[in-house]
Image: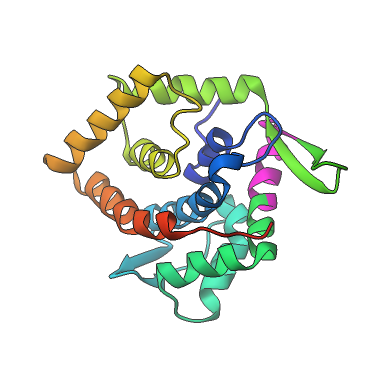
Amino acid sequence: MDKRSLTQEYYMAAVDTKGNMPAMHRDASYAGLVVAGLMEMVAEGVITIEKKKITVNKELPEKMGYLTSLYQYMGEKARTTDQLINAYMAYGTRMKQLTADVGESLAADGSAQKAEGGLIGQKTVYIPSKEAKDELIGRFKEAFLGGTMDAQDISLAMILKETKNLYANFTKEETKAVKERLKDMKSGPADKPWADMINYVDDMSAIMASITTISM
């Protein structure tokens, strides 16, 4: 199967078998979805981020339609990354829309199943198929634990690490190895796309760490 986008891969890796973000660190996990969307748009040249200020450069490509609500919100007025992420965390409707759009994109290609969730089925969830999730995690492990990585792999690893979602998909030894490799990359020379992604995610880590409430 073709490689999915950063936002789609993050969603698939982060949610549990019921299509929910992990209860123990749900707020940070939802914040990570916004960060993944931002990083994806940076990589595509749709936006630039300088000193936390977001600048919209061009129209959102059709292939990234699941980020339309996020893109449109950024276009309403100038915002910093802090303001944007906090706005999404403060208003559940924005996060619900982004989550649903990403979920629908995965359901459309058969990577996830749309279902009713919650205690009494009061919300819609998108559950990644076991086959698709296993394929993603297997490819990711191969790339990060000795294979060839790209900027998307690095971004995904860093966001999963900052949102405490590495442990769900990696053994203790594998998690330690990923963290060590990230540490080496941050302290050593790197190609510009990699260095940019590392710096962007680093800048937003403090924002994600400061998130303590969300109403979903």
Residue sitting at x 46%, y 72%: 83
Residue sitting at x 63%, y 48%: 102
> Residue 30: percent from the left, percent from the top?
56, 51
Of all residues, the one furthest to the right in this rendering is 120
Question: Is residue 142 in sight in this rendering?
Answer: no
**Numbered disc total:** 0
Q: Is residue 78 above or below residue 107?
A: below
97 vs 22, left or right, is right
Q: Residue 205 magenta-drawn?
A: no
Q: Is residue 123 above or below residue 76?
A: above
Coloring applied to the structure:
rainbow
Dividing the picture into quadrants, the one containing residue 140 is: top left
Q: Nearer the viewer, residue 207 or 43?
A: 207
Q: Is residue 2 above or below residue 116?
A: above
Q: Nearer the viewer, residue 85 or 200?
A: 85
Q: Is residue 113 above or below residue 104?
A: above
Q: Residue 102 magenta-drawn?
A: yes
- Which quarter of the rendering shows the C terminus? bottom right
Question: Is residue 154 in sight in this rendering?
Answer: yes
- Which quarter of the rendering shows the N terminus? top right
> Residue 21: percent from the left, percent from the top?
61, 42
80 vs 23, left or right, is left
> Residue 41: percent from the left, percent from the top?
44, 57
Dividing the picture into quadrants, the one containing residue 8 is: top right
Q: Nearer the viewer, residue 87 or 146?
A: 87
Please report the bounds of the magenta region as a residue range: 100-113
Residue sitting at x 53%, y 62%: 60
Magenta part mainly helix, strand or loop?
A: helix
Dividing the picture into quadrants, the one containing residue 152 is: top left
Of all residues, the one furthest to the bottom in this rendering is 77
208 vs 52, left or right, is right
